[in-house]
Image (cartoon, rainbow, N blue to C red):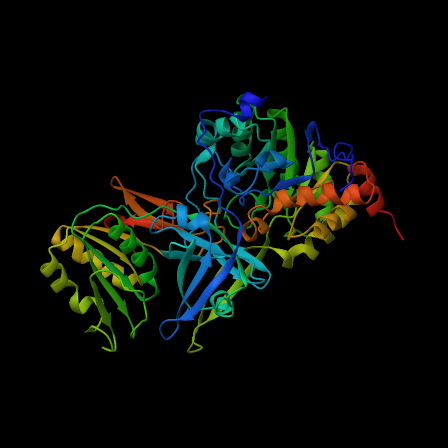
Amino acid sequence: MMQNVQNQSFPPVIKKGPYTSEVIENRKISEDIYILKLRSPEITQNALPGQFVSIKCKDLLLRRPFSVAKVYDDDTFALIYKVIGEGTQFLTGLKPGNTADFIGPMGNSFTIEDKNPLLIGCGVGIAPIIYLAQKMDEKGIKYNCIIGTRTSIDLDPISNPCFLTEDGTCGLKGRLDHHLEDIIAQTGTKKIYICGPNPAMIYATRAAKKHGIEIEVALEKVMACGTGVCMGCVTEITENGEKVQRRVCRDGPIFNGANIIWE
Amino acid sequence: MGVESQNTTDMSTPIGLLMLGNPVLTASGTFGYSNEYEEFLSLKNLGAIITKGITLNPKKGNPQPRIKEVPNGLINSIGLENFGIHEFIDKKLPVLRDNDIEFIVNIAGESIDEYKKVASTCRESGIEAIELNLSCPNVDKGCLEFGRDEETLYKLVSEVRESFSGVVVVKLGSNVSFPEKIAVTAQKAGADAISAINTVKAMNLSLNPDYKGYKFIKGGLSGPCIKPIALNFIYEIKKRISIPIIGMGGIMTLTDMLEFLAVGADAVQVGTATFTDPNLSEKLVFELKNFMETNGFSNINELKHSLRTRT
């Protein structure tokens, strides 16, 4: 019996919570966007860019998923969230010293490679992109990064940012589709990494195809389990020329943009 | 915790010939096929896991949207997406066996023949227990179609019974006119146990902002809001059948679980609550054991007997 339990063919299981962690900071950084810092060595040591945590929000039945946005030396990590519904409304009320219950890190991650990368985060989609930038900095990979928001945003400094605001209060004025072609031409990037609203990701995917460059996208979808068992968040993609359904929470949230069948 | 009582509390629960270590199971569709939740708990601590519904061939399921949270509940319309019994046997069964996990295979189908074929495949692979999904409200054909008509249900269960020598659990739901008649029929047809309830047919609307039309999702409702429906269902069928009942529907706490035992359940399944707390099922096992020790119940039958005392 013992041999069976200790079966060598299975790698050791990394526990993913639930963890109860201390709230360090919860601060508004743009009109309806907040940064939430939690203390958790489990996340700072294990989370890869693109992965997310799912937070229990008060009495709501389903946890809410949020991308890891940054990790710090003192075992804390940051999430960036936009106030949309009951779950995120609850988060705004968290104060330093309170605790948050979360599981993670969940999902797959961006492929970090040095192909003169162009990182694009739009709206609350900046979260995984900022973490990706942090990891690229650590690896000494040079990149360009577009941070596109409706209005100016108060972020920790990142290397080479190109701010893009719809209202022109910071950096370039306008939306991604007004500037992307120019930026691709100027930077000569060979790979785009993007997270943002679907129209921005669809636009970037088309541009990538046109210029023959790679693109990885971070998808967002309403999730029930967030662990890969309920099949609630499946999305259609093409794999080897075949239409298949993949779980955003487990097989994703990062996919090859060229394979996505946009709804 | 009693000082020397750790080994004297007997939670073992028979479901037909299957002897479970305790009465806490995880519900089909909420726990994957095998070891998906090992990142959150020790699977060996559970009474058993019930695997996600399996059909003969792979099934694509329903289009999006598939899920919608409502107050104290969840509407799902997954439509039984799964990779078919053969991939289950090839990929998941070895994981269940190598990890020594107690399990029951949930089966769905569009025809009686499909249920029989999947059950036979299970028998050939040495699977000990199956749960027949005769109550999923999210598919056009099969499942509930067979679970709401006594004649069809009898035919299906008795024929599967002939092709499968192990334990047959019949999973019923509340979307029927006469639950007790359906349960009696399942027992007559040879079911070893009844599990209930599956999700409740439901719909959620989102009115368009201009009040011209609406968007909607129809599906099966689960979560704490269906607990009263589930308790009533089990209370009613318990009067008429003698085979074990595995109760489910909105169980989130130890008290919920005790309520199910009180109305007649012999074991319970934790479903949607796993999405809230991935290790809830395991916590309930520990809490139940602790509760029995604290209150001097040496085995689960004593507890059930006490809970069912009419006052």
Name the quadrant of the C terminus of chain A: bottom left
Q: Is residue B240 visible?
A: no
**Number of numbered discs overlaid on the protein picture:** 0
When the figure is inspected, residue A46 is found, relative to residue B119, above or below; the finding is below
When the figure is inspected, residue A223 is found, relative to residue B266, above or below; the finding is below
Looking at the picture, tell me which residue is in the foreground, A90 or A21. A21
When the figure is inspected, residue B211 is found, relative to residue B75, above or below; the finding is below
Left or right: where B304 falls relative to B76 = right
Left or right: where A254 falls relative to B111 = left
Looking at the picture, tell me which residue is in the foreground, A258 or B21. B21
Left or right: where B292 falls relative to A59 = right
Name the quadrant of the N terminus of chain A: top right
Residue located 46% across and 24% down the image:
A8
Give the residue at the far right of this rendering: B311
Quarter-of-image position of residue A176: bottom left
The x and y percentages for residue A128 are 33, 56
Residue located 44% across and 53% down the image:
A53
When the figure is inspected, residue B103 is found, relative to residue A22, above or below; the finding is above
Quarter-of-image position of residue B241: top right
The x and y percentages for residue B198 are 61, 48
Q: Is residue A111 visible?
A: yes
Residue located 65% across and 29% down the image:
B167
The x and y percentages for residue A239 are 28, 41
Residue located 26% across and 65% down the image:
A147
The x and y percentages for residue B81 are 45, 43
